Amino acid sequence: MTTNENAKEWVKWATELLRPDEVVWIDGTGLEKLREETLKSGEMIKLNQELLPGCYLHRSAQNDVARSEDKTFICTTKKADAGPNNNWKSPEDMKNILLPLYDGCMQGRTMYVIPFCMGPVGSPFSKLGIEITDSAYVVLSMCIMTRVSKEVIKRLDNSDEFVKGLHAKAEIDENKRYIAHFPEENAIWSINSGYGGNVLLGKKCFALRIASYQAKNEGWLAEHMLIIGIENPKGEVQYICAAFPSACGKTNLAMLIPPEGYEKKGYKVWCVGDDIAWIHIGPDGRLWAINPENGFFGVVPGTNKQSNPNALAAIQKDTIFTNVAHDLDNNTVWWEKLDKNPPENGINWKGEPWNGKTSKEKGAHPNSRFTTPSINCPNISPEFGAGEGVPISAIIFGGRRARVEPLVYQARDFQHGVFVAATLASETTAAQTGEVGVVRYDSMAMKPFCGYDMGDYFAHWLEMGEKLGDKAPEIFNVNWFRTDEEGEFIWPGFGENMRVLKWILERCNGEASAEDTAIGYMPKPEDIFMEGLDLAPEKLVELLSIDKELWCEEADGIREYFNTLGDTVPQKLWEALEELEKRVEIEN
Ligand code: OXD
Ligand code: MN
């Protein structure tokens, strides 16, 4: 319980609205009792504690397995403030819909009150929140994903500002599901879902949608970015932020292990964060980033010894698995592409008997997840908890593009980098519903997460660039997903991405050469260190080529996309588009 009068007042208001049987404050202690309760209620299954100590399995409702973008709203007084990139309702209209749904919905249930901190406790960049929920799974997940402790409650006692997150599972009724954000009053209301991204309110809802709005007003950036440190053989570490749309391998890159040759030379990659970065201008005028989260909420299928050995190691203890397959013989978990040995005596993510050797159905849902503490990760950075954050040398943007984008290029300057970021796009994969290979623009990988108008967000980035001046980080674009005539990926990806990161850092340090092309500065094939990699030289030439026809089409696509964003797209970005159009016409 806190002594903060505003917090007490708000919890009282919520208690009267929701009418739970009991109210329990969470301070990060006594969680064992809560876990026991989830076993009794069937909310979680305790896994084999010898093989997977501290690990549990949870299954969400079958209609509730991913973020519900069509049910996610930004509720600002003026519609224009939410922008065409968001679903909008006025705060009043939304509350008129939601209040009757919340009314008495916790009768017969326990209401948990979780004070939490996003960012290292005591960091000047951290922010506090309180989540109210009727889900013990949410409580246990929030205690992994955010900082929850007595110390946090003490900070709350003396704090004027906190984000109010109200979550109720209600009936998990898809038709009455809402994830509503009220940026003008630092509030999030979520109802009728029990799935991660919709209900772990510290993550996308607070740390991106609400925080991006705060960041615009306060002069910083809340971004959908991983943060890594790359240590060279001299022991110097340089940090990079990277933004990729969902399902482009952010967690894999964050936990990258350099190829053998690099490791032998003494290169190391340190993970500061895999999903979200809060970035401020530091006392030295550069950008400094913290990871506001305290855990990883990663996609499980595809995680294996080759793709991400660090993630695999991290999830061997103290992890909650959601919607993976249950191996009944060993009381362990399994998912697609873990290994070639699926359980015969299993239960699939839907809770049905499942034989992995004979069934054509998937055992794990494609969006099944692990929730695991950051400190479990073998390459977690010693700077993970640093209150001042880490200084950023480069920002990378990347998507899945089969043909158009080369392996890597560098923006000419920060302003051009904002254009590169604003025009980030990715092609749909089989993991999404709908047609495969459709290009979706996802500016800064923030389209689903920006809590205000996209054009205003671009303008905020440009303003940040002006403030940074010559201290601005270099901006790059990468594409690990280029395919050949047969549709096969050309670049091996995973650990080999280190070769591209090395060129990027060399560019930042003025140590590598590049060619000025129509789209930006590109390495020549000999600029990428290829020793120890079995890739034919002509393949690298192909990866570093740009096709004039495709880039003309790309420019048309960007024009169409900018038009959908309305008249707030800054003039400077339209000019950058015209420049691109001219250069691809003339130079290629
Ligand atoms: C995520 C996402 O869950 O981006 O991180 O969808
Ligand atoms: Mn994400």
Image (cartoon, rainbow, N blue to C red):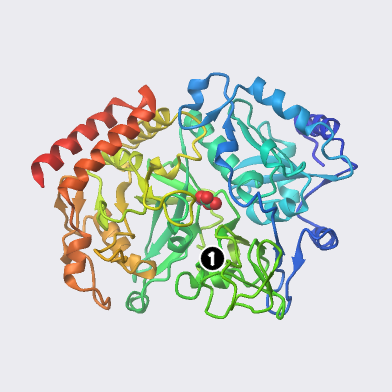
Horizontally, is 216 left or right of 411 in the view?
Answer: right
State the image coordinates of residue 416 (x, y, percent, origin top left): 26, 39
Where the N terminus falls, by quadrant? top right
Q: Residue at x 37, y 64 (%)?
A: 236
Query: Foreground: 177 or 574?
Result: 177
**Residue 546 falls left or right of residue 415:** left
**Residue 29 picture location, percent across and down:** 79, 57
Q: Residue at x 55, y 67 (%)?
A: 377
Which residue type does callout 1 highlight?
Answer: Pro
Q: Position of residue 372 (x, y in %)?
A: 62, 62
Q: Is residue 466 visible?
A: no
Q: Quadrant of residue 552?
A: top left
- Residue closest to the eye, 113 or 431: 431
**Left or right position of 35 against 526:** right
For the residue labelled by badge 1, is the local secondary structure a helix, a strand or a loop? loop
Camera sees residue 53: yes
Vertical relation: 54 (above or below) 150:
below
Q: Residue at x 53, y 19 (%)?
A: 78
Q: Look at mark 1 in the image and give the residue it sits on.
A: 301
Residue at coordinates 80% horizontally, 36% vertically from top-left? 3
The quarter holding residue 345 reads bottom right
